[in-house]
Image: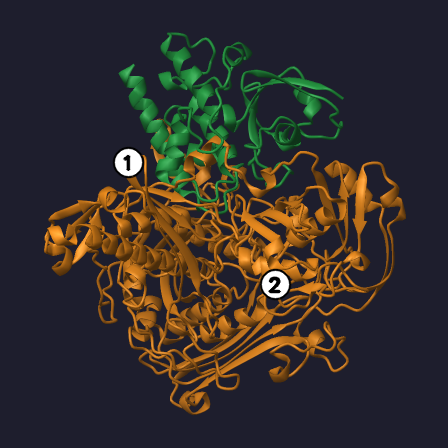
Chain colours: A green, B orange
């Protein structure tokens, strides 16, 4: 079958997709987006977490066909996604509901309108340079939250979604929001540090605005 | 019940030692001692980092392994006809298709068939391979292969393995250990006898005995076994793979492919964690076989289910211990027997036995010991390396014994440990003298002195009176208690781990370092075969090069087999050994730079001949701080490029009868205090703090050091309360090969982990550093167990602790 959906703001199409293929497989093996990870492929580890119409999902549990016509954000597009959200917030609108940086909370996800207004820029595959990192990506590096990095893409997508709806999460909130993402290397302490750091910076930039 | 009071002074002597001071490169930014950030960090947070499962090649096929559905059976027949006839299937291989005379591989003993030959010895053993144009086609084709098994009785424990009429797992053994084992179903046996334990026991006022059971733990690295094999025009193959030791893989792969090593070119691709589980071969040979057969690139990626069968696990163990002590708490003697279940193939079992026996006393002074450790061959899943490697199981048992002894003597458990703590100069049971700082009493003091977390953290004052946050309680959001039946417990443990490969192994590493001028500034390139598995070795490598060469720009060359072996990324050894090799090669490069400088500029300034010279910030500088020349001017168009092997102090084999010998390179110590809340009615445990103190000798990258300690601590927590591969004792089949049924700690299960890092230099090691990765995995588990015992008063002699163990239901 053929599937069409939007990934990181760009229309994508895949042909000859077997009906049993997951969204994760199509992203990784047919669209050249292997950032979403395949640690368990049974919905337990969260390493494949993407936003599907704004909602964080395990892409291994979503049949590719279910994504037809929908909006997907993967780790590859996270930096631009966060930047667009930031710009939308500073432009004075909170209409998209994706304006965690303004300090409001309560609504979750990003509206289709908001998702469709942007598209991700590429980064250099050799160095990763070329794009600004999102606050949560930068914080993960600085806090030492990345070791092997296999859980990192899913955690980033989940943590970014948390910060979008809750600007100043408590530790208990962070733990609850990230409880579907397994990490085997870090013992999670530095992941908590990273989310706290990103939240603190978000607060400050919110004040500055 | 609250824990014992804090602030008790250590009864042991104060630990001596100090951190290493640097002269060369001490002013260079981004050098050792700084928490520089990972060079692969940006790639890893943007999703661009290429893990072994992300490889893709034009025209690539997918490989699939067919694995045995039974644990022990003769294979009567294999019919591949239907599988081969499927559209999209390019090859189906069985034992009969293996191209070379060598058909087995293994880390120490070549007892593991590439594909089963006439017999399978464990559940999930590879039997056949398929290559197809889609992974689902490959899976379906594998399912169409008909294998006829005639089941054999299964050997699952010591009694069945050593019975007079026991079936032998491996007939006709000719390995190095067969001559000294009492039964062919024992892989290796290491006794250690020192002093006279029976005689010393007479001096004991109290004796405690215990029988302990350690469950089978899985490494559960998140990146599944995977890789891509690309056939070459020369009849060879290029293999991109996630592993812990490229050269060890190569030595095992080439012979079964029937190729010389130079025709198997290996490149490390991104590794999603390892923890010992990638020391053994998994899909490497299979992918190469399929690629060579089909002439097409072949990618194999295990799913999580297959991953549980695709690598060895931590040895489950039964441990029998006896300790004696005088009334005032001094240990008189120790006797123990440690039975490790090695499963169907040897893997690293002999070395695990060596560790378990030589570290079985723990970090304590006991002059009279009688020790025996064995690893069995059984039909259970093969077991081998996992973080802590034999020392973990022993630590769980000897620390339980320490608490038992303290209770019997009515002593504080930390004071008892401190009273018997080893120090620099103590003799190991092997007769080896511990010749660097051993701050055992001090790290215990530090974790004990830390203030305890407040009681009843789940209660807070709210608008409507007190409010309860169930997330801070056992059971969490299941909302099973608001504090009723919840009891706090506090427990302590300390452990000793060796660093590096032991028992006379030639544990060297190789580093190639190049210094040249690029774009008007000096740039160093570091090329090693070290497997970066997430630990941050490459971060530290760049730091060492900056410090040793006084440069800012360092490029880390991808790890491959075009440079000499770096040894394994295991045994807490890489920063020590490959770090040491890089330091050593950098020193040679530096000497060469100075030599060129003297040749060019020596006549212009007497300091070239007389002063101690260092490289700082791209300049040649005297020890007095005077700049003599820039490295740019010294080198101009010349590149200095040096590849050297480097070795730490040699070790010796343990005597097969007495266990005596200087078997280990270095020792490393960590201590934990665990604080738990136990719902005694439901048997639910919440660990609320797991504090660690560890001596690291020198923290080359403090951020990474703390990350290693917290990660290791959490793996120890997992085995304490949740992690176990369950093998059916009747069938030897694995019952929980998934992340649904094999649980590893989530962020909700993991407490805050405060870390106290000591830096007492080991003068024998580069920069005085101590390997750090494994020690925290040892003491974490027994500390949690001790805390649960403290809360419940139960004996708890088994990991993991499950609710039914606490409620008796």
Q: Secondary structure at mark 1?
A: loop
| Chain containing the residue with disc 2 | B
Q: Can you give x and y, in whole percent of width and height, for residue B715 in the image?
A: 48, 53
Where is B417 relative to A100, above or below?
below
Q: Is residue A135 above or below residue B20?
A: above
Give the mark count: 2
Which chain is disc 1 placed on?
B
Query: Badge 1, how many Cα within 10 Å: few under 14, some, many 20+?
Result: few
Residue at 39%, 55% in the rendered image: B674
Task: Please state if B500 lies on the left or on the right of B73 as rendered.
Answer: left
Say which of marks 1 and 2 sits in front.
1
Q: Residue B181, position in %: x, y?
A: 62, 82
Report how far apart the C-alphas of labels 1 and 2 lie in the structure: 53 Å
Is B473 displayed left or right of B517 in the figure?
Answer: right
Residue A94 percent across, percent down from the top left: 42, 10
Q: Which mark is residue B520?
A: 1
**Relative to residue B442, is residue B465 depicted above or below?**
above
Nearer-the-camera pick, B364 or B25: B25
Please state the horizontal and vertical placement of residue B504, each as a whole percent of the image.
46, 75
The C terminus of chain B, quarter of image:
bottom right
Q: Earlier in the sequence, mark 1 or mark 2?
A: 2
Q: Nearer the viewer, residue A192 or A23?
A: A23
Q: Which mark is residue B383?
A: 2
Q: Secondary structure at mark 2?
A: strand
In front of the other: B166 or A125:
A125
In the image, is B167 to the left or to the right of B651? right
């Amino acid at each position: 079958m053929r599937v069409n959906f939007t990934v990181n703001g760009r229309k994508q199409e895949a042909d000859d997709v077997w009906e049993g293929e997951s969204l994760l497989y199509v992203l990784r093996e047919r669209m050249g987006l292997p950032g979403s990870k395949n640690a368990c492929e049974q919905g337990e580890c969260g390493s494949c977490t993407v936003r599907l119409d704004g909602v964080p999902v395990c892409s291994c549990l979503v049949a590719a066909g279910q994504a037809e016509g929908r909006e997907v954000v993967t780790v590859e597009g996270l930096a631009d996604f966060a930047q667009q959200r930031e710009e939308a917030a500073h432009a004075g609108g909170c209409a998209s509901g994706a304006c965690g940086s303004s300090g409001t909370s309560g609504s979750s996800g990003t509206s289709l309108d908001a998702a469709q207004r942007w598209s991700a820029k590429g980064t250099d595959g050799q160095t990763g340079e070329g794009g600004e990192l999102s606050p949560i990506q930068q914080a993960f590096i600085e806090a030492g939250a990345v070791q092997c990095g296999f859980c990192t893409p899913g955690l980033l997508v989940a943590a970014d979604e948390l910060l979008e709806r809750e600007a100043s999460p408590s530790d208990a909130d962070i733990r609850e929001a990230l409880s579907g993402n397994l990490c085997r290397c870090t013992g999670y302490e530095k992941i908590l540090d990273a989310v706290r750091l990103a939240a603190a910076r978000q607060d400050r930039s919110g004040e500055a605005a | 019940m609250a824990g014992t009071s804090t602030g008790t002074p250590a009864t042991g002597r104060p630990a001596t030692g100090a951190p290493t001071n640097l002269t060369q490169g001490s002013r260079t930014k981004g050098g050792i001692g700084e928490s520089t950030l990972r060079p692969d960090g940006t790639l890893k947070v943007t999703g661009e980092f290429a893990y072994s499962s992300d490889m893709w090649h034009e025209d690539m096929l997918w490989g699939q392994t067919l694995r045995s559905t039974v644990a022990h059976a003769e294979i009567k027949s294999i019919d591949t006809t239907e599988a081969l006839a499927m559209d999209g299937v390019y090859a189906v291989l069985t034992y009969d298709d293996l191209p070379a005379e060598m058909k087995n591989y293994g880390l120490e003993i070549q007892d593991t068939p590439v594909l089963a030959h006439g017999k399978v010895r464990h559940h999930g053993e590879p039997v056949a391979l398929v290559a197809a144009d889609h992974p689902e086609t490959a899976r379906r084709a594998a399912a169409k292969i008909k294998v006829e098994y005639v089941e054999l009785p299964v050997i699952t424990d010591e009694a069945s393995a050593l019975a007079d009429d026991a079936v032998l797992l491996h007939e006709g053994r000719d390995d190095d250990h067969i001559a000294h084992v009492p039964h062919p179903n024992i892989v290796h046996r290491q006794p250690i006898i020192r002093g006279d334990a029976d005689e010393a026991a007479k001096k004991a006022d109290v004796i405690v005995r215990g029988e302990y059971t350690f469950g089978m733990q899985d490494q559960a690295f998140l990146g599944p076994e995977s890789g891509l094999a690309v056939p070459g025009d020369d009849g060879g193959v290029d293999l991109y793979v996630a592993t812990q030791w490229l050269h060890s893989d190569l030595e095992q792969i080439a012979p079964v492919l029937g190729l010389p090593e130079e025709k198997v070119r290996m490149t490390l691709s991104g590794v999603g964690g390892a923890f010992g589980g990638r020391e053994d071969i998994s899909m490497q040979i299979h992918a190469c076989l399929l690629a060579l057969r089909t002439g097409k690139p072949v990618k194999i990626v295990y799913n999580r289910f297959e991953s549980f069968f695709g690598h060895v696990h931590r040895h489950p163990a039964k441990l029998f211990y006896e300790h004696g002590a005088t009334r005032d708490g001094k240990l008189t003697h120790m006797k123990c027997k440690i039975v490790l279940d090695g499963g169907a193939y040897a893997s690293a079992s002999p070395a695990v036995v060596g560790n378990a026996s030589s570290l079985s006393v723990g970090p304590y002074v006991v002059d009279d010991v009688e020790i025996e450790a064995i690893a069995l061959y059984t039909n259970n899943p093969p077991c081998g390396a996992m973080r802590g490697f034999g020392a973990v199981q022993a630590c769980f048992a000897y620390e339980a014994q320490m608490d038992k002894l303290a209770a019997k003597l009515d002593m504080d458990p930390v004071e008892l440990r401190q009273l018997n703590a080893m120090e620099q100069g103590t003799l190991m049971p092997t007769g080896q003298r511990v010749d660097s700082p051993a701050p055992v009493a001090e790290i215990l003091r530090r974790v004990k002195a830390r203030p305890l977390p407040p009681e009843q953290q789940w209660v807070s004052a709210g608008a409507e009176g007190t409010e309860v946050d169930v997330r801070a309680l056992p059971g969490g959001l299941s909302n099973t208690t608001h504090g009723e039946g919840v009891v706090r417990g506090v427990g302590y443990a300390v452990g000793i781990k060796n660093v590096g490969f032991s028992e006379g192994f030639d544990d060297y590493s190789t580093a190639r370092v190049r210094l040249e001028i690029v774009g008007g500034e000096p740039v160093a390139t570091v090329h090693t075969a070290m497997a970066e598995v997430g630990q941050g070795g490459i971060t530290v490598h760049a730091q060492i090069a900056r410090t040793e060469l006084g440069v800012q720009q360092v490029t880390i060359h991808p790890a491959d087999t075009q440079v000499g072996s770096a040894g394994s990324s295991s045994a807490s050894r890489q920063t020590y050994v490959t770090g040491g090799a890089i330091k050593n090669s950098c020193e040679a490069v530096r000497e060469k730079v100075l030599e060129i400088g003297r040749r060019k500029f020596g006549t212009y300034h007497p300091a070239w001949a007389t002063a101690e010279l260092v490289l700082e910030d791209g300049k040649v500088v005297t020890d007095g701080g005077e700049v003599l020349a820039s490295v740019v001017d010294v080198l101009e168009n010349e590149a200095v490029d040096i590849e050297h092997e480097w070795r730490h102090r040699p070790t010796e084999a343990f005597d097969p009868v007495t266990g005596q010998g200087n078997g280990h390179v270095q020792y490393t110590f960590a201590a934990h205090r665990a604080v738990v809340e136990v719902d005694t009615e439901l048997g639910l445990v919440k660990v609320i703090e797991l504090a660690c103190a560890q001596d690291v000798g020198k923290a080359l990258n403090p951020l990474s050091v703390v990350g290693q300690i917290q990660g290791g601590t959490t793996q120890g927590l997992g085995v304490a309360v949740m992690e176990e591969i369950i093998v059916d004792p009747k069938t030897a089949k694995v019952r929980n090969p998934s992340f649904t049924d094999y649980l590893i700690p989530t962020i909700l299960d993991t407490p805050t982990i405060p870390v106290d890092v000591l830096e007492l230099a080991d003068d024998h090691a580069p920069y005085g550093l101590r390997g750090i990765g494994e020690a925290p995995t040892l003491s974490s588990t027994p500390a949690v167990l001790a805390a649960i015992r403290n809360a419940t008063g139960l004996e708890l002699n088994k990991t993991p602790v499950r609710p039914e163990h606490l409620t008796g239901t």
